Amino acid sequence: MEGKLIVLEGIEACGKGSAVPSILKWFADRGLRTLHTREPGGTAYGEALRELLISKDHNAPPISDALGFYGARCDHTQNMIIPALQQGIYVICERYADSSLAYQVSSCPEVRAVHELCKPHLLEPDLVLFLDISADTSLVRMEKRRIEKKIPLDKFESKGYDYLNQVRYNYTELALDESGHIKQNWRVVDAEQSPEEVVADIESYLAAFMRAA
Ligand code: TMP
Protein backbone atom coordinates (compact mmCIF):
# COMPACT_ATOMS: atom_id res chain seq x y z
CA MET A 1 0.00 0.00 0.00
CA GLU A 2 1.42 3.36 -0.99
CA GLY A 3 -0.45 5.72 1.33
CA LYS A 4 0.06 5.97 5.08
CA LEU A 5 -2.36 5.77 8.00
CA ILE A 6 -1.82 8.61 10.44
CA VAL A 7 -3.94 8.48 13.58
CA LEU A 8 -4.68 11.20 16.11
CA GLU A 9 -5.37 9.97 19.63
CA GLY A 10 -6.04 11.53 23.02
CA ILE A 11 -8.62 12.16 25.72
CA GLU A 12 -11.60 14.49 25.28
CA ALA A 13 -10.80 17.99 23.97
CA CYS A 14 -7.13 17.14 23.40
CA GLY A 15 -7.18 19.25 20.22
CA LYS A 16 -7.46 16.63 17.46
CA GLY A 17 -10.07 18.62 15.55
CA SER A 18 -8.06 21.85 15.77
CA ALA A 19 -4.89 20.16 14.55
CA VAL A 20 -6.46 18.50 11.50
CA PRO A 21 -6.62 21.55 9.13
CA SER A 22 -2.88 22.21 9.61
CA ILE A 23 -2.06 18.55 8.99
CA LEU A 24 -4.15 18.50 5.80
CA LYS A 25 -2.45 21.71 4.64
CA TRP A 26 0.98 20.29 5.44
CA PHE A 27 0.36 17.38 3.07
CA ALA A 28 -1.37 19.52 0.43
CA ASP A 29 1.64 21.90 0.40
CA ARG A 30 3.77 18.91 -0.58
CA GLY A 31 1.40 17.85 -3.35
CA LEU A 32 0.18 14.80 -1.41
CA ARG A 33 -3.44 13.70 -1.34
CA THR A 34 -5.22 13.15 1.98
CA LEU A 35 -8.42 11.69 3.33
CA HIS A 36 -9.66 13.05 6.65
CA THR A 37 -11.84 10.63 8.55
CA ARG A 38 -12.81 9.69 12.10
CA GLU A 39 -13.86 6.89 14.41
CA PRO A 40 -16.40 5.88 15.22
CA GLY A 41 -17.54 6.92 11.78
CA GLY A 42 -16.13 7.47 8.33
CA THR A 43 -18.49 5.19 6.40
CA ALA A 44 -22.29 5.45 6.48
CA TYR A 45 -22.32 2.25 8.56
CA GLY A 46 -19.78 3.68 11.00
CA GLU A 47 -21.54 7.03 11.29
CA ALA A 48 -24.84 5.23 12.04
CA LEU A 49 -23.12 3.21 14.76
CA ARG A 50 -21.52 6.41 16.09
CA GLU A 51 -24.95 7.81 16.87
CA LEU A 52 -25.71 4.78 19.02
CA LEU A 53 -22.29 4.43 20.61
CA ILE A 54 -21.84 7.96 21.92
CA SER A 55 -25.50 8.65 22.77
CA LYS A 56 -26.57 8.86 26.40
CA ASP A 57 -30.00 7.47 25.45
CA HIS A 58 -28.99 3.82 25.72
CA ASN A 59 -27.79 1.70 28.55
CA ALA A 60 -25.98 -1.01 26.61
CA PRO A 61 -23.41 -3.01 28.60
CA PRO A 62 -19.70 -2.22 28.04
CA ILE A 63 -19.19 -5.34 25.90
CA SER A 64 -21.77 -3.97 23.44
CA ASP A 65 -19.78 -0.76 23.15
CA ALA A 66 -16.55 -2.70 22.62
CA LEU A 67 -18.12 -4.81 19.88
CA GLY A 68 -19.82 -1.77 18.32
CA PHE A 69 -16.63 0.29 18.10
CA TYR A 70 -14.80 -2.65 16.51
CA GLY A 71 -17.72 -3.43 14.18
CA ALA A 72 -17.57 0.14 12.90
CA ARG A 73 -13.76 -0.01 12.69
CA CYS A 74 -13.64 -3.15 10.55
CA ASP A 75 -16.05 -1.59 8.04
CA HIS A 76 -14.17 1.72 8.10
CA THR A 77 -10.85 -0.05 7.54
CA GLN A 78 -12.02 -2.36 4.79
CA ASN A 79 -14.31 -0.01 2.88
CA MET A 80 -12.67 3.38 3.32
CA ILE A 81 -9.14 3.35 4.73
CA ILE A 82 -7.60 0.48 2.72
CA PRO A 83 -9.04 1.64 -0.64
CA ALA A 84 -7.66 5.15 0.02
CA LEU A 85 -4.21 3.84 0.99
CA GLN A 86 -4.15 1.73 -2.17
CA GLN A 87 -4.57 4.93 -4.18
CA GLY A 88 -1.55 6.48 -2.46
CA ILE A 89 -3.68 8.70 -0.22
CA TYR A 90 -2.51 9.77 3.25
CA VAL A 91 -5.34 8.91 5.64
CA ILE A 92 -5.64 11.26 8.62
CA CYS A 93 -7.88 9.47 11.08
CA GLU A 94 -9.21 10.91 14.33
CA ARG A 95 -9.06 7.89 16.66
CA TYR A 96 -8.50 4.24 15.80
CA ALA A 97 -8.06 0.99 17.75
CA ASP A 98 -6.02 2.58 20.55
CA SER A 99 -9.13 4.59 21.45
CA SER A 100 -10.96 1.36 22.23
CA LEU A 101 -8.02 -0.01 24.19
CA ALA A 102 -7.79 3.24 26.19
CA TYR A 103 -11.51 3.98 26.65
CA GLN A 104 -13.14 0.54 26.94
CA VAL A 105 -10.53 -1.53 28.77
CA SER A 106 -11.39 -0.47 32.32
CA SER A 107 -15.08 -1.36 32.11
CA CYS A 108 -14.58 -4.19 29.62
CA PRO A 109 -11.22 -6.02 29.80
CA GLU A 110 -12.57 -8.36 27.09
CA VAL A 111 -11.92 -5.52 24.62
CA ARG A 112 -8.39 -6.94 24.26
CA ALA A 113 -9.85 -10.24 23.02
CA VAL A 114 -12.17 -8.33 20.66
CA HIS A 115 -9.09 -6.50 19.38
CA GLU A 116 -7.27 -9.78 18.71
CA LEU A 117 -10.35 -11.19 16.97
CA CYS A 118 -10.63 -8.18 14.67
CA LYS A 119 -6.89 -7.72 14.05
CA PRO A 120 -6.88 -9.50 10.65
CA HIS A 121 -9.42 -6.92 9.45
CA LEU A 122 -7.53 -3.90 10.82
CA LEU A 123 -4.28 -2.07 10.14
CA GLU A 124 -1.36 -1.03 12.30
CA PRO A 125 -1.16 2.77 12.00
CA ASP A 126 2.01 4.06 10.36
CA LEU A 127 2.03 6.95 12.81
CA VAL A 128 0.08 7.65 16.01
CA LEU A 129 0.13 11.25 17.24
CA PHE A 130 -0.95 11.14 20.88
CA LEU A 131 -2.08 14.62 21.89
CA ASP A 132 -1.51 14.51 25.62
CA ILE A 133 -3.39 16.77 28.04
CA SER A 134 -4.33 16.40 31.71
CA ALA A 135 -7.83 15.47 32.86
CA ASP A 136 -8.10 18.97 34.41
CA THR A 137 -7.38 20.65 31.07
CA SER A 138 -9.81 18.33 29.34
CA LEU A 139 -12.62 19.26 31.73
CA VAL A 140 -11.94 23.00 31.39
CA ARG A 141 -11.88 22.80 27.56
CA MET A 142 -15.05 20.66 27.42
CA GLU A 143 -16.93 23.11 29.62
CA LYS A 144 -15.80 26.04 27.45
CA ARG A 145 -16.88 24.17 24.31
CA ARG A 146 -20.23 23.19 25.84
CA ILE A 147 -21.01 26.84 26.65
CA GLU A 148 -19.76 28.18 23.28
CA LYS A 149 -21.38 25.55 21.06
CA LYS A 150 -24.45 24.92 23.24
CA ILE A 151 -24.14 21.15 22.58
CA PRO A 152 -24.69 18.83 25.55
CA LEU A 153 -21.83 16.49 26.45
CA ASP A 154 -22.04 12.97 25.00
CA LYS A 155 -21.78 9.69 26.90
CA PHE A 156 -17.99 9.56 27.21
CA GLU A 157 -17.54 13.31 27.67
CA SER A 158 -19.85 13.14 30.70
CA LYS A 159 -17.91 10.51 32.62
CA GLY A 160 -15.86 12.93 34.70
CA TYR A 161 -12.38 13.41 36.13
CA ASP A 162 -11.51 9.88 37.30
CA TYR A 163 -12.51 8.31 34.00
CA LEU A 164 -10.55 10.88 31.96
CA ASN A 165 -7.54 10.36 34.17
CA GLN A 166 -7.76 6.59 33.76
CA VAL A 167 -8.10 6.88 29.96
CA ARG A 168 -5.08 9.19 29.86
CA TYR A 169 -3.10 6.69 31.93
CA ASN A 170 -4.19 3.89 29.58
CA TYR A 171 -2.89 5.91 26.63
CA THR A 172 0.46 6.48 28.32
CA GLU A 173 0.73 2.69 28.81
CA LEU A 174 -0.28 2.02 25.20
CA ALA A 175 2.46 4.41 24.05
CA LEU A 176 5.16 2.12 25.45
CA ASP A 177 6.66 -1.05 23.99
CA GLU A 178 7.72 -4.09 26.07
CA SER A 179 11.04 -2.49 26.99
CA GLY A 180 9.33 0.67 28.27
CA HIS A 181 10.31 2.92 25.36
CA ILE A 182 7.86 4.96 23.29
CA LYS A 183 6.64 2.69 20.48
CA GLN A 184 8.43 3.25 17.18
CA ASN A 185 5.21 4.48 15.45
CA TRP A 186 4.03 6.70 18.35
CA ARG A 187 4.80 10.37 19.01
CA VAL A 188 3.67 12.05 22.22
CA VAL A 189 2.70 15.70 21.67
CA ASP A 190 2.40 18.05 24.65
CA ALA A 191 -1.07 19.33 23.77
CA GLU A 192 -1.20 21.64 26.80
CA GLN A 193 0.88 24.06 24.72
CA SER A 194 -0.61 26.85 22.59
CA PRO A 195 -2.29 25.69 19.34
CA GLU A 196 0.65 27.15 17.37
CA GLU A 197 3.17 25.18 19.42
CA VAL A 198 1.13 21.98 19.08
CA VAL A 199 1.00 22.43 15.29
CA ALA A 200 4.75 23.13 15.16
CA ASP A 201 5.48 19.91 17.08
CA ILE A 202 3.14 17.89 14.87
CA GLU A 203 4.71 19.34 11.71
CA SER A 204 8.20 18.46 12.88
CA TYR A 205 7.05 14.89 13.62
CA LEU A 206 5.44 14.68 10.16
CA ALA A 207 8.63 15.94 8.52
CA ALA A 208 10.74 13.34 10.34
CA PHE A 209 8.18 10.63 9.55
CA MET A 210 8.19 11.44 5.84
CA ARG A 211 11.99 11.58 5.72
CA ALA A 212 12.12 8.08 7.23
CA ALA A 213 9.31 6.67 5.03
P1 TMP B 1 -14.71 12.09 19.39
O1 TMP B 1 -15.45 12.92 20.39
O2 TMP B 1 -13.25 12.22 19.49
O3 TMP B 1 -15.25 12.19 18.02
O4 TMP B 1 -14.96 10.55 19.82
C1 TMP B 1 -16.20 10.06 20.13
C2 TMP B 1 -16.23 9.46 21.49
O5 TMP B 1 -16.15 8.04 21.39
C3 TMP B 1 -15.11 9.87 22.43
O6 TMP B 1 -15.72 10.21 23.66
C4 TMP B 1 -14.29 8.64 22.64
C5 TMP B 1 -15.23 7.50 22.33
N1 TMP B 1 -14.59 6.34 21.74
C6 TMP B 1 -14.46 5.18 22.49
O7 TMP B 1 -14.85 5.14 23.65
N2 TMP B 1 -13.90 4.09 21.90
C7 TMP B 1 -13.48 4.08 20.61
O8 TMP B 1 -12.98 3.06 20.12
C8 TMP B 1 -13.61 5.31 19.85
C9 TMP B 1 -13.16 5.33 18.43
C10 TMP B 1 -14.18 6.40 20.45
Image: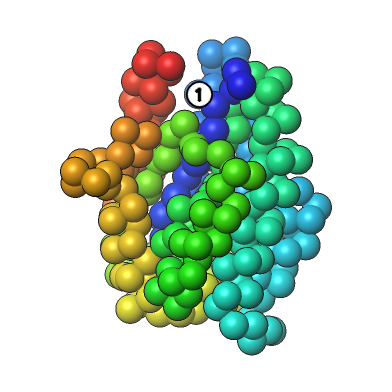
Q: Quadrant of residue 28?
A: top right
Residue 70: percent from the left, percent from the top?
62, 58
Residue 160: percent from the left, percent from the top?
40, 79
Q: Nearer the viewer, residue 26 or 127?
A: 127
Residue shown at 34%/77% (left/top)?
Answer: 161
Residue 37: percent from the left, percent from the top?
64, 43
Name the amino acid, label 1.
Answer: Trp
The residue labelled by disc 1 is 26
Q: Is residue 201 visible?
A: no
Residue shown at 60%/18% (left/top)?
Answer: 2
Whether label 1 lies within 8 Å of ligand 1 gets the answer: no
Q: Is residue 58 left or right of residue 63?
A: right
Task: Mark 1: give few (<14), some (14-19) or many (20+) Cα within 10 Å.
Answer: some
Q: Is residue 29 left or right of residue 121?
A: left
Residue 43: percent from the left, percent from the top?
76, 48
Residue shown at 65%/19% (left/top)?
Answer: 88
Q: Quadrant for the C terminus, please.
A: top left
